[in-house]
Image: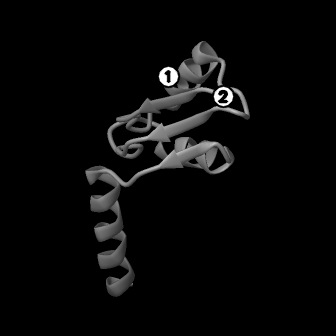
Amino acid sequence: MVTYVISDIHGQYNMFIELLDKIDLKDTDTLYILGDVLDRGPHPIKTIRKLMEMPNAICLVGNHEFMAMKCLEFLMKEI
């Protein structure tokens, strides 16, 4: 059992998958994501969906997720 900690994926799905392959993440390992999964990169939704499929990934909210939640809150009121 190994613990990994990363942050600032920023929607870079392909790079994230490369990293998972490089560390050879096992089901018994734990992966902490210290925020900023969203924004900037081309595949933020694909990245989030991958993380949601990973029971051994624990994600913390970063400032980019916080901004996205605030934006969604505003949009829900406007719509």
Q: Which residue is mark 1?
A: 15
Dot 1 lies on which element? helix
Q: Residue 31's x, y, as percent?
A: 54, 36
Which of the two labelled residues, at mark 2 and mark 1, occupies the earlier sequence position? 2
Can you say whether 6 is above or below 65 in the image? Answer: above
Q: Residue 10's x, y, as percent?
A: 38, 37
Q: Which residue is mark 2?
A: 1
Q: CA distance from mark 2 to mark 1?
A: 23 Å
Q: Residue at x 60, y 26 (%)?
A: 2
Query: Where on the picture, by quarter, is residue 30?
Result: top right
> Badge 1: few (under 14), some or many (20 or more) residues near its Cα, within 10 Å?
few
Of the numbered discs in the image, which one, if any, rests on residue 56?
A: none
Q: How many marks?
A: 2
Q: Amino acid at mark 2?
A: Met
Dot 2 lies on which element? loop
Q: Are marks 2 and 1 in contact (CB under 8 Å)?
A: no
Can you say whether 19 is above or below 34 in the image? Answer: above
Q: Amino acid at mark 1?
A: Met
Query: Where on the picture, by quarter, is residue 67?
Result: bottom left
